[in-house]
Image: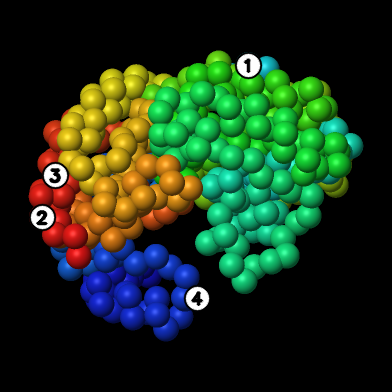
């Protein structure tokens, strides 16, 4: 007998259960979810909110997308689990073939896991096995996950506090963050930080480099977009040292930037590409895809996942890709161009330092113009203002991400199906919040 457990719940009762029975790590956005549809979420008290964050860039084809739900239901009626790497099944086979078709260049073979951090860790293992080297280079301010391996790559002490030691043999280099870069002094990015990769390899490694790992657009770092030529130069340096380029598309993939993959904007084919988040529109699934020569370095037993490639999640992922290819990515490109222009209007406010992004992965950096920022480049970040804007938007029925390395960036990462009117509603609400700001 089925039971509607949500019928007796309220926001307060669900939050009380979280406090009592879940480990105290959940981020409270004041919006518990009872149900969701397309770009709208509803809490247990019947309040509706426009979702401009999509569960951290996950529900790219909209909450409850009919095609994705139907695909998952059909697979549920067949079987739910057989362990992909013990019992071959059609959904995993079809999805792997589809990824070989839609991923950049000659990427061909995939491994399925359950999350982005697993995808990154698997990619590192593969790079080490293929190259025979051990060291890894990542970016300062980057985010690659919270398990110990990917945490070592993550360039932010806020995520690492009390968690050391992580894995060894990791070095970091400056990100292409022109707004707060001493090399660029707040001007257009010169790509000098790409050349700095060579310096860091020569001074911080033992020249035993297996991989350079980068996000093509840095999400948690504050929606940081590299300039043309940066990613290809980093790959060139990596290859010169016998290392692979791992492009982490966990947050930027599956249409988020107006191309199926953010690396498509830069005409770069990664050697290994981790993916997750938008891959199955909310069902837990991750993957990393490599060209055949690299992938075949793995031998039986080198890597495994009990739940990775779950047939229900794979069926949902196939439907998600079909939905994206049926006009959603093209629409994202158009809406993203409009949103980028509209957000640029916010730079008329002296507390808006910069707006930036690609597609529907856009950021608004909020500042205190009276104070100088880190390294005497650009005004100081203003996380208090960012928190104020986030709260103001929730009061207006809008959920938006607030993050960035300095916790001062508004993050537009809505379902890619969001109408332009709802994007305008969100920007107008930000303007209201900025008008309402008194500096406290």
Circle 3 — which element?
A: helix
Image mark for residue 23: 4
Residue that carries the numbered disc 1 in the rendered image: 105
Of the numbered discs 3 and 4, the one sitting upstream in the chain is 4
From the image, tell me which residue sits under label 3.
431
Does residue 429 appear left or right of residue 241 in this picture?
left
The answer to which quarter of the image holds residue 187 is top left
- Residue 436's label in the rendered image is 2
**Most distant residue in the bottom direction:** 20
The reply to whether discs 3 and 4 touch (Cβ–Cβ < 8 Å) is no
Q: Secondary structure at mark 2?
A: helix
**Mark 3 or mark 1: which comes first in sequence?**
1
Residue 439 visible in the displayed image:
yes
Q: Check contact, mark 4 vs mark 1: CB within 8 A.
A: no
What distance separates the C-alpha of mark 1 from that of mark 2?
A: 49 Å
Question: Which dot, 3 or 4, sits closer to the camera?
Answer: 3
The tag earlier along the polypeptide, 4 or 2, is 4
Residue shown at 37% from the left, 42% from the top: 378
Residue 133: x and y, percent?
Answer: 86, 39
């Amino acid at each position: 007998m089925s039971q509607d457990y949500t019928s007796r719940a309220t926001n307060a009762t669900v939050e009380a259960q979280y406090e009592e029975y879940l480990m105290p790590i959940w981020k409270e956005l004041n919006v518990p979810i009872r149900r969701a549809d397309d770009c709208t979420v509803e809490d247990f008290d019947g309040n509706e909110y426009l979702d401009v964050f999509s569960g951290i860039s996950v529900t790219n084809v909209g909450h409850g997308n009919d095609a994705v739900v139907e695909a998952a239901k059909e697979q549920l009626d067949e079987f739910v689990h057989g362990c992909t790497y013990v019992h071959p099944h059609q959904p995993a086979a079809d999805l792997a073939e589809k990824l070989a078709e839609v991923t950049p260049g000659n990427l061909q073979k995939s491994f399925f896991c359950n999350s982005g951090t697993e995808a990154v860790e698997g990619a590192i293992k593969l790079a080490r096995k293929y190259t025979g080297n051990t060291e890894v280079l990542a970016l300062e301010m980057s985010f690659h996950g919270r398990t110990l391996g990917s945490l070592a790559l993550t360039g932010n002490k806020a995520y690492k506090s009390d968690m050391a030691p992580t894995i060894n043999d990791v070095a970091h280099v400056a990100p292409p963050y022109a707004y707060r870069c001493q090399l660029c002094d707040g001007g257009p990015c010169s790509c000098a930080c790409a050349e700095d990769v060579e310096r860091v390899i020569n001074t911080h490694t033992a020249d035993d480099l297996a991989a350079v790992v980068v996000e093509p657009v840095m999400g948690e770092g504050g929606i940081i977009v590299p300039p043309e030529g940066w990613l290809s130069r980093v790959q060139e340096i990596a290859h010169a040292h016998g290392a692979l380029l791992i492009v982490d598309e966990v947050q930027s993939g599956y249409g988020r930037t107006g191309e199926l993959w953010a690396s498509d904007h830069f005409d770069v084919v990664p050697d290994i590409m981790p993916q997750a988040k938008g891959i199955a529109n909310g069902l837990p699934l991750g993957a990393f895809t490599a060209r055949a020569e690299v992938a075949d370095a793995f031998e039986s037993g080198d890597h495994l996942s009990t739940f990775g490639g779950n047939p229900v999640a794979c069926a949902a992922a196939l439907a998600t890709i079909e939905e994206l290819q049926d006009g959603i990515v093209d629409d994202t490109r158009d809406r993203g161009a409009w949103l980028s222009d509209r957000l640029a209007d916010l730079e008329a406010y002296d507390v808006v330092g910069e707006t930036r992004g690609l597609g529907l992965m856009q950021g608004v950096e909020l500042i205190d113009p009276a104070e100088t920022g880190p390294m005497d480049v650009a005004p100081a970040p203003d996380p208090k203002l960012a928190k104020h804007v986030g709260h103001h938007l929730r009061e207006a029925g809008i959920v938006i991400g607030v993050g960035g390395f300095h916790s001062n960036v508004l993050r537009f990462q809505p379902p890619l199906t969001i109408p332009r009117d709802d994007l305008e509603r969100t920007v107008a609400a930000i303007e209201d919040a900025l008008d309402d700001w008194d500096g406290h």
